[in-house]
Image (spheres, rainbow, N blue to C red):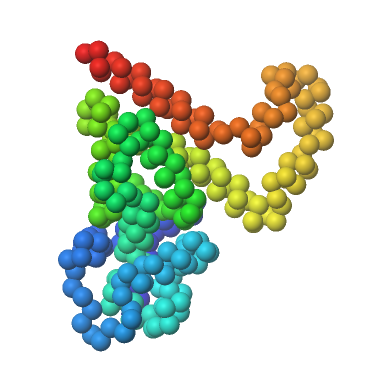
Amino acid sequence: MTKSGPAAAADGTTTGSGDIARSLELLWGTGERPSRGPRPGLTLDRIVATAVDVADAEGLAALSMRRLAAELGTGTMSLYRYVPGKGELLDLMLDRVQGEPLAADASQVPDDWRRAIDEMARTYRDNLRAHPWLLKINQARTVLGPSALRGMELALTGLKDMGLDGPELIGVIITVNSYVEGFVRTESHATEAARETGLGHEAFWENQRPYLERAMLSGAYPRMAALPHDAFGDEFDHFAFGLGRLVDGFEVLVRERARK
């Protein structure tokens, strides 16, 4: 018995969805439970948790049903009694990690939309850093489970006083999430490059320093040459700077709506 895995793109990303009906049944707890002698101690929750641990430690490329079975100390066929294949497994993994940072109830959501956006962005950033494999999954058509809907509900609760209409509120969430994903993806790429080449960040830039110094002294790049030495330093919080400018832009729109 063989199961086809999720489709992988040339850039290493993969689609999460397998059989959408089976994923939804498993996410919402409406599917049939294993009936052919499931192994004692083996549960769907344990399977998904172990899969997340493998992906966190070694990336999605290391995760397969065979590897997962080995980690759980069971046969691969036993896993198929709980989850049809890797595609559905990824759907379950997504919903699991999306639920990790969510507030227990809506009363914990900041009552100021500016603070709510800041918290939403930083929470999402931290979750992507904790689970970098999330950036490898194409979530354009994510199967929505309880955690995904709960996250959206809490986000909308935090933005409720902006005075925007439905499409605009969704636009705010998309804009913030896209900013966070882009920022963390750049971080992730730098980390991957250092690991794959064995060349750390400092050594990488040190190799280029003599060439860059000559270029700056040539007069061909006056604007760059005029930058202070700390322009690219880690001391400046680029994440907070960019997020703050997004909030400033949203503020303009909120004020416009308030005047109408």
Quadrant housing the N terminus: bottom left
Q: Is residue 94 visible?
A: no
- For the question of whether residue 231 can be seen, the reply is yes
The vertical placement of 111 against 99, above or below, is: above
Name the spot of residue 202 as percent of width and height, x first: 73, 45
Relative image position of residue 32 (x, y in whole percent):
18, 73
Q: Is residue 136 left or right of residue 218?
A: left
Left or right placement of residue 30 versus residue 227 in this view: left
Instruction: Give residue 209's quadrant in the image.
Output: top right
Q: Position of residue 121 (x, y in %)?
A: 41, 39
**From the viewer's perspective, is 48 left or right of 105?**
right
Q: Residue furthest front?
A: 107
| Above or below, 14 relative to 160 | below
Q: Residue at x 66, y 32 (%)?
A: 232
Figure quadrant of the C terminus: top left
User: Which residue is rendered at x = 33% and y = 79% of the image?
Assistant: 42
Q: Residue at x 51, y 45 (%)?
A: 185
Q: Position of residue 62 (x, y in %)?
A: 50, 67
In the rendered view, does 68 fall on the left or right side of 25?
right
Q: Residue furthest bottom?
A: 37
